[in-house]
Amino acid sequence: MAMERAGGKREAGKAERKERIYETSLALFRSQGYEATTVDQIMKQSGLAKGTFFNYFPTKDAVLRYMGSREIGRLGAASLVGNDGSALGKLKRLMCALATGFEENRDLVCLVFRSAMSVPELMVGDAGGFSLRPTASLLLRQAQRAGEINPVLSPDMLASALDALYLQQLVRWCESEEPYPLSERLTGMADLLLLGISTQMREDAVG
């Protein structure tokens, strides 16, 4: 029992240090720019030894990439365990919440897609941490069990299609010279796909 408590404290300590480095990095990126910020400055500001940075992030780019996986992981976990509303509704709210967070950090998110991520990385894998495919697949499986979408459709294929559309909109948003509400684009895109696969729409069409 004592060993379990000690292990739990160690893991909590690691998580706290990673979050401290992440939050400090983002604060400095916002205030003085990504290029002007050094690892030395991040660690001095966070009050941790310089070498600690590389225990959690191999490069500064990795901090930016963590932004996507952190938000998707945090918001996705909350949506999966919640019992309020339909699974499709949860998926749409997840995308809206992600968009709101990305809008608050537009310059940094766009930096990832403009320079820190190559085209091959964007098209395969987890898109540098910004892919929502795993979470979307789980929510779509929930939707099938609840009878919200056609049960013969592949949730993994649907999640991949949704993820591709979402990443496409994210890239376009970053390429746009004039900022516009990302949340409206993502939720509108989600409606087009999700309404198309919903059982209610299928039943209405048959009727």
Image (cartoon, rainbow, N blue to C red):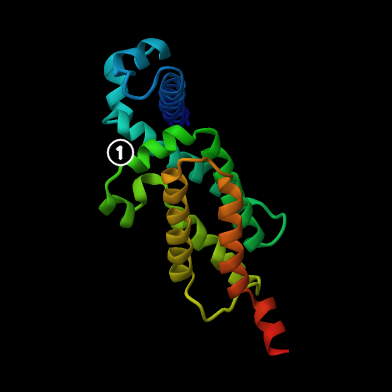
Is 159 located above or below residue 97 in the figure? below
In the picture, measured across the screen, residue 123 lies left or right of residue 131, that is left
Image coords of residue 32 (percent x, y): 41, 17
Quadrant of res 176: top left
Image coords of residue 192 (percent x, y): 59, 67
Q: Amino acid at mark 1?
A: Ala
Specify the farthest residue to the front.
177
State the residue at coordinates (30%, 38%). 116
State the residue at coordinates (46%, 28%). 12
Image coords of residue 31 (percent x, y): 45, 18
Residue 139 visible in the current orientation: yes
In the picture, measured across the screen, residue 194 lies left or right of residue 20, that is right
Quadrant of the drawing holding the C terminus: bottom right
Q: Tag 1, which secondary structure?
A: helix
Please give the count of numbered marks on the rendered protein. Answer: 1
In the picture, measured across the screen, residue 4 lies left or right of residue 48, that is right
State the residue at coordinates (72%, 54%). 84
Please tell me how crowded label 1 is: few (under 14), some (14-19), or many (20+) other residues with Cα within 10 Å. some
Is 36 located above or below residue 119 in the figure? above
Q: Nearer the viewer, residue 56 or 43?
A: 43
Image coords of residue 113 (percent x, y): 36, 43
State the residue at coordinates (42%, 26%). 22
Q: Which residue is mark 1?
A: 116
Is 64 located above or below residue 157 in the figure? above
In the picture, measured across the screen, residue 41 lies left or right of residue 196, that is left
Specify the farthest residue to the bottom.
207
Residue 94 visible in the current orientation: no
